[in-house]
Image (tube, rainbow, N blue to C red):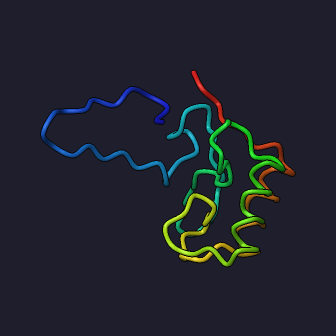
Amino acid sequence: MGALPVSVATGSPTYYDLSNSLSQAYAGNQIQVDASPVRFALYSGDVNQDGTIDLTDGSLIDNDAFNFASGYLQTDLNGDGIVDISDALFADNNGFNFVSKITP
């Protein structure tokens, strides 16, 4: 969700770059991931989409990792096609920092 309203036209794509400024996202709910060039990213880890990254999300990731799940899955947070410890680290770090969604 952008910080400001974005016009959307029917029949043509709408582009909105969230990566170049913290103020691009609503309530600045992003994190800087690179300094040169400056890049921002959205948080990852709310697997069950309840608005908070917590142990429930970690448990879902852990279950899929234990079962060697692969493919296009919500628990594959880094998008490499395999659910493993690297995905659990995203959720664990963001949960530790109390990351949750911010809505208008």
Which residue corresponds to the image point at 67% horizontal and 36% vertical from the top-left?
A: 50
Up/down of 59 relative to 88, above or below: above
Q: Residue furthest right?
A: 96
Which residue corresponds to the image point at 60% horizontal and 66% vertical from the top-left?
A: 76
Q: Residue furthest top?
A: 104
Residue 48, position as x, y percentages in the image: 65, 45
Pick the front one: 53 or 74: 74
Q: Would residue 43 be found to the left or right of residue 14 on screen?
A: right
Residue 29, position as x, y percentages in the image: 63, 40
Which residue corresponds to the image point at 73% horizontal and 57% vertical from the top-left?
A: 60
Number of numbered discs: 0
Which residue corresponds to the image point at 27% horizontal and 29% vertical from the top-left?
A: 7
Up/down of 55 relative to 4, above or below: below
Q: Residue furthest front?
A: 67
Pick the front one: 4 or 50: 50
Residue 47, position as x, y percentages in the image: 65, 51
The quarter holding residue 100 reads top right
Pick the front one: 73 or 43: 73
Up/down of 1 relative to 90, above or below: above
The C terminus: image quadrant? top right
The quarter holding residue 9 reads top left
Residue 2, position as x, y percentages in the image: 46, 35
Q: Would residue 71 be found to the left or right of residue 15 on screen?
A: right
